[in-house]
Image: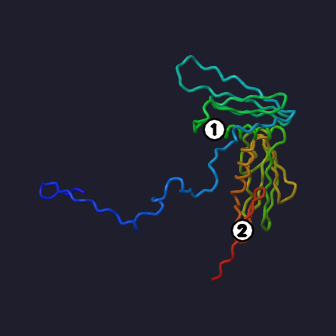
Amino acid sequence: MAIMKCGKLLKQPVAALPDFLVPSLLNLPLRTRRSFASSAPRTSRVGAAPIALPPDVNLRLLDPPKRRSTITRVEPLKTVEIEGPLGKASVQLPPFVSYNIDDAAKKATLSVLDKKSRDQREMWGTTRSYLQNHILGVSEGHTAILRLVGVGYRATVEPSAITVKPEYPGQNFVSLKVGYSHPIELGIPMGVKASTPLPTRILLEGIDKEVVNSFAASIRKWRKPEPYKGKGIFVNEETIKLKAKKIK
């Protein structure tokens, strides 16, 4: 330890810490140290998992659009078109992701150029999940069921609306009566089918899982479930834990 005093540098010996102040963990050899987790670290294998293809679903790789002869470092994205009995969908693949189809086993697999790259591993699993959701959407479809819990809560599907203008020809609207002085009217997105099998049930169907769940969330936000009386709009198997009433 060095101290400046009157322009002179004085050196003092550094005192060693007593043994009882040193953590006992540092004195252990490396082989006897144990981590907090008992399981061995393992990486995700989602991207490498094969995707089962239904017999009536076809995948086709589309060529990237041609660009002008300009110098650019951005590689064009590849597009996979999925066609099934319920419609068509497309997924964009990053340049470092490639896919292979086994026609005999009816399975599709994805691979990346560098498995050691963190960015490529992350997009590997994400792209595989997107492709799996679209294959399931064009073959079976995605659904979301909303439950309206509350006195007087009702929902209907109307061909026209008063407070909202249609975004495309033939658009239907979901009308909610959830405790406001006026009905709440929401336009149904294109590609989504809405129906009300019961006055307190809304059934959403579509081939795009992201669009279906996003529209379900936009309906839910008008009456989020509250924990005291358990009223609100619940999506699918959503539940809420009731709290005790506040007593003054």
Q: Residues within 10 Å of mark 1 (few under 14, many from 20)?
A: some
Mark 1 vs mark 2, CA separation in Å:
36 Å
Q: Which residue is mark 1?
A: 123
Secondary structure, mark 1, is helix
Image location of residue 183, percent across then percent down: 75, 58
Secondary structure, mark 2, is loop
- Which residue occupies 66% across, 22% down? 65
- Which residue occupies 24% across, 59% down? 13
Between marks 1 and 2 in the image, the one whose residue lies nearer the viewer: 1
Amino acid under disc 1? Met
Residue 90 vertical placement versus 4 (above, below): above
- Which residue occupies 60% across, 32% down? 114
- Mark 1 or mark 2: name the one nearer the start of the chain: 1
Q: Which residue is mark 2?
A: 241
Residue 28 vertical placement versus 129 (above, below): below
Q: Nearer the viewer, residue 2 or 199?
A: 2
Image location of residue 218, percent across then percent down: 70, 52
- Which residue occupies 71% across, 68% down? 241
Image location of residue 58, percent across then percent down: 82, 30
Q: Nearer the viewer, residue 65 or 112?
A: 112
Image location of residue 25, percent across then percent down: 48, 61
Q: Contact, CB < 8 Å: mark 1 with mark 2?
A: no
Q: Which quadrant holds residue 110?
A: top right
Amino acid under disc 2? Lys
Q: Which quadrant holds residue 115?
A: top right
Q: Quadrant of the N terminus?
A: bottom left
Position of 154 compared to 98: left or right? right
In the rendered image, the residue lying farthest to the top is 69
In the rendered image, the residue lying farthest to the left is 6
Q: Quadrant of the C terminus?
A: bottom right
Q: Residues within 10 Å of mark 2 (few under 14, many from 20)?
A: few
In the rendered image, the residue lying farthest to the bottom is 248
